[in-house]
Amino acid sequence: MFRILPILLLTGVCSLGLAQPAPDTLQIPLPGAPPLSFTRIPAGSFLMGSPEDEAGRDGDESPQREVTFSAAFYLGTFEVTQAQWLAVMGENPAQFQHTPQHLQHPVETVSWADCQEFIYRLQRLGLGLFRLPTEAEWEYACRASTTTRFYWGDDPEEWQSHQYGWINSRSHAATHVVGIKQPNPWGLYDMAGNVWEWCQDTYAPYDGSPARRDTLKVFRGGSWYDFIQSQRSANRHKHGLHERFPAIGLRLVLEQRLPTRRLPLAGDQTISFVHIPAGKFVMGSDSSDVFYQGDEFPAHEVVLTRDFWLGQFEVTQAQYEAVMGYNPAVFQRLPQAGDRPVDMLSWDDCQTFIAQLNTLGLGNFRLPTEAEWEYACRAGTNTLFSWGDDLAEGPMLAHAWYNSRAEGRSHPVGFKKPNSWGLFDMCGGVWEWCQDWLGPYQAEAQTDPQGPEEGTRRVYRGGSWFNEPEALRPANRHGHPPDTRGTNSGLRLVWEP
């Protein structure tokens, strides 16, 4: 099964979690492979497509239209290499593995769907948020402020192309080490030739008419197999999302660089945490909330005076089994069960798991307080949902597994879009136990609240695959006796180094 990873539109370089000014390049380390390098692409406008008198053009490159990017973004300096794919996926699908330096060649023979799986696994490493570029981003970055046929000029005699890209007549029928040819004016290598590069978009005409087939995806840039016309900045092609060819690879966009830490567990399991800054927020809701519940009132200010580290994902079945030696989950017989959140956990079970985890010498672990949980879920927002006030199914489905769309079961963590602090599945997935006893709110402002000193029910938050949209709200709260287990109850951890 392939994963369609939704696009997050950058609203500014600050979404990368970087101090200003933003650097021109970034490197994201990979285990056992060269780092992923990214180049900052400035905000701006360009004319997308080609004029009707451009030599070698195709009909689907018109009409031309102006496209504006209001924010900078980071695009891969190079195409993803065989070594980088191997480090993430554990296998190398490339056809061209016959030279001593083949691991430095671009990976190829990967479908659009394969690329989505690569991105999903890359994000599970806790290194940041990634995606394929949109077709518009790709052409904008390729042109690098040029308006000519190629990013090195119109090249009417077509003799300059060999300085910039590997194409049919000079490629010796193979890919080559990335970064050998001259870059474009913005410092991006192999935007022309070597391998075609998948884009996120479904192929559609430029005239505004709808896509004819949702399964056709765009790729750009030409390859070692193609003639010079394919290297034009406006050139575009399409293939089915499951089709693989030894001339198509990928280049990534880095959407968000997360302040994360990844800790080792038994076997090959790790667990990732995101740094959550201290701050204040309004906790709870009031009658203006269309799904308002009485125990969410009164809304009140909460100040959290200390930064903390919160799990980037819900604890998975594989992680739980690595610590405890067994798997209690109901959904353990489904495909990719190890990547699904562990379920059938009571609050007491969570304490037993945490006690065992705390013997591993990795630091101190605990459940989040209810205030920490809602603060991290909101991620600086004060809207109905962490993604806004929109009740439409589209945004909801992009962020959460919930009753009408979850097919009656849990799903692998990290599949949906994260919140703005890079936390996945804070809404939907499984309910997440908190440390607190459930009790009424107070109107007065609170500082680092811990909940009531005693009670009969422990708090859990976030909704689940079993629940409808009202349970996905950051303000929504529920509780059960601490020995209660359910097929939709799990946990997310706080780590104290």
Image (cartoon, rainbow, N blue to C red):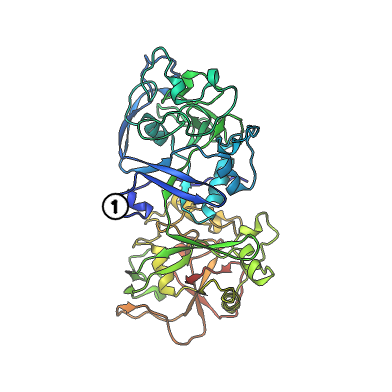
The total number of labels drawn is 1
Question: Mark 1 — residue?
Answer: 20
Q: State the residue in front, 476 or 135.
A: 135
* Residue 443 pos. (x, y %): 31, 79
* Residue 163 pos. (x, y %): 44, 23
Q: State the residue in front, 58 or 297.
A: 58
* Residue 282 pos. (x, y %): 32, 70
What residue is shown at x 30% (from left), y 78% (from top)? 445
What residue is shown at x 39% (from left), y 54% (from top)? 390
Q: Is residue 131 above or below residue 405?
A: above
Could you tell me which secondary element the residue under label 1 belongs to?
Answer: loop
What residue is shown at x 40% (from left), y 26% (from top)? 207
Q: What type is the residue that disc 1 sits on?
A: Gln
Is residue 151 rendered to the left or right of residue 83?
A: left
Q: State the residue in front, 39 or 8.
A: 39
Whether residue 291 is visible here, answered yes or no, is no
Residue 91 picture quarter: top right
Whether residue 365 is visible here, answered yes or no, is yes
Residue 279 picture quarter: bottom left
Decide: few, some or many residues near mark 1? Use Cα within 10 Å; few <14, some 14-19, many ≥20.
Answer: few
Q: Is residue 282 above or below residue 246?
A: below
